Image (cartoon, grey):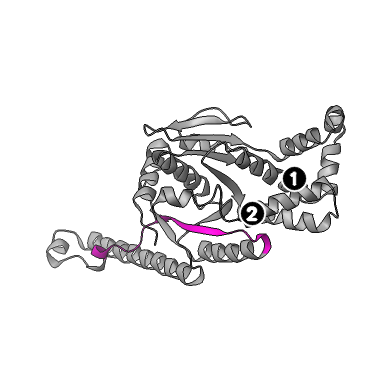
Amino acid sequence: MDLRELLLESHVRFIVGKGGVGKTTIAAALALAGAASGLHVQIIELEGRDELLRCFDVEGSLDFEPRNLYTHESGGEVSARHLGADEALLEWLRDHGFSRLLSRLRSSGALDVIATAIPGIRDVLILGKIKALAREQVADVIIVDAPATGHSLSLLAAPAALSAAARSGPIRRQAEEVAEMLHDEQRCCVTLVTLAGELPVSEAIEAAFDLEDRAAVALSVLVVNQFDGAHAQLRTPLSTVDREQLSADVAQSVEAARLFTLARGDEEQLQRERLSEKLPLNQLVVSHLDVDTINLDALMSIATQLLDSELQ
């Protein structure tokens, strides 16, 4: 299976990972790789951050109206939009006959009261809007740059909890319809992103089980980001000839650096094997890039890795 086929397996793909693992970068790179394969990929950003735009060397900000970020010669493209919780709540109220009350609800602070009185309503309405965008076929693939793992779990588990709490009415119907989308792997899936370290791997494993148990959402490919691994040449110490060309202190420092890098690479490989043992998911491995910030050139490098990768 190539990356294009993988992306087309589910219409909506949530990218989930703990803070610092490169979740937004991977979401952007998957979208860019999809565009290079001739697909229209739309990224939905939920937290109002500018990181996604910086990845594509685009200035400004996102709002609900989609914005083109990249067009490939194949005709594929990447667009993006921001979807906020309050905007989703306002739209739902407007669609259910409360248009005349919206300004009063906003000015009085009643919106927060509504959201607090119905736990999970904001999350369900965000997911409901994503469901509507998928139904409208705004793109071949929708990639959701989801919040950090804990919030993502709450987001994806909210429909089941709300449908159980609400006995009837439009809120329950919305929750049930969203839950149907989440439980259909042709419509929705989750891609977990992690680093090959002991703590992030442990958290990814825990998140995978929690997502299946609490949200009943299908888990797709697992992305191991910033992977170095142990290079074979590091297993050979400096030769006698090389040592003779260096001072004793420098030779000792080089040997210490070799052993440290080798040990770190072996540990990364060990953690990848632990992931494979605990989570029987295909893996996409993205190597570490020696860059300070992710721009379009760096993103293209990652996308190329994804396109050239074989699922492992």
Identity, as a three-letter code, of the amino acid under mark 1? Arg
Query: For the residues marked 2 and 1, what is the alpha-carbon distance in whole angstroms?
Result: 16 Å
Image position of 53 (left or right of 259)? right
* Residue, disc 1: 122
Count neighbours of disc 2 (C-alpha within 10 A) and say few if under 14, some if 14 to 19, many if 20 or more. Answer: many
Q: Nearer the viewer, residue 81 or 142?
A: 142
In the image, residue 252 lies in the stretch drawn in magenta: no
Q: Which residues are magenta?
A: 214-234
Which numbered disc covers residue 227? none
* Residue, disc 2: 182
Q: Vertical placement of 245 versus 279: above or below?
A: above
- Counting labels gives 2
The answer to whether residue 132 shows anywhere in this view is yes
Tag in front: 2 or 1: 2
Q: Residue at x 83, y 57 (%)?
A: 165
Image position of 302 (left or right of 126)? left
Q: Vertical placement of 250 versus 178: above or below?
A: below
Give the mark nearest the N terminus, 2 or 1. 1
The quarter of the rendered structure image containing the N terminus is bottom left
SS type, badge 2? helix
Image position of 217 (left or right of 256)? right
In the image, residue 231 lies in the stretch drawn in magenta: yes
Count neighbours of disc 1 (C-alpha within 10 A) and say few if under 14, some if 14 to 19, many if 20 or more. Answer: many
Image position of 178 (left or right of 110)? left
Where is residue 166, by image quadrant?
Answer: bottom right
Q: Position of residue 32 (x, y in %)?
A: 43, 40
Q: Position of residue 311 (x, y in %)?
A: 39, 59
Q: Residue at x 39, y 41 (%)?
A: 37
| Residue sitting farthest toward the left | 241
Q: Residue at x 44, y 67 (%)?
A: 271
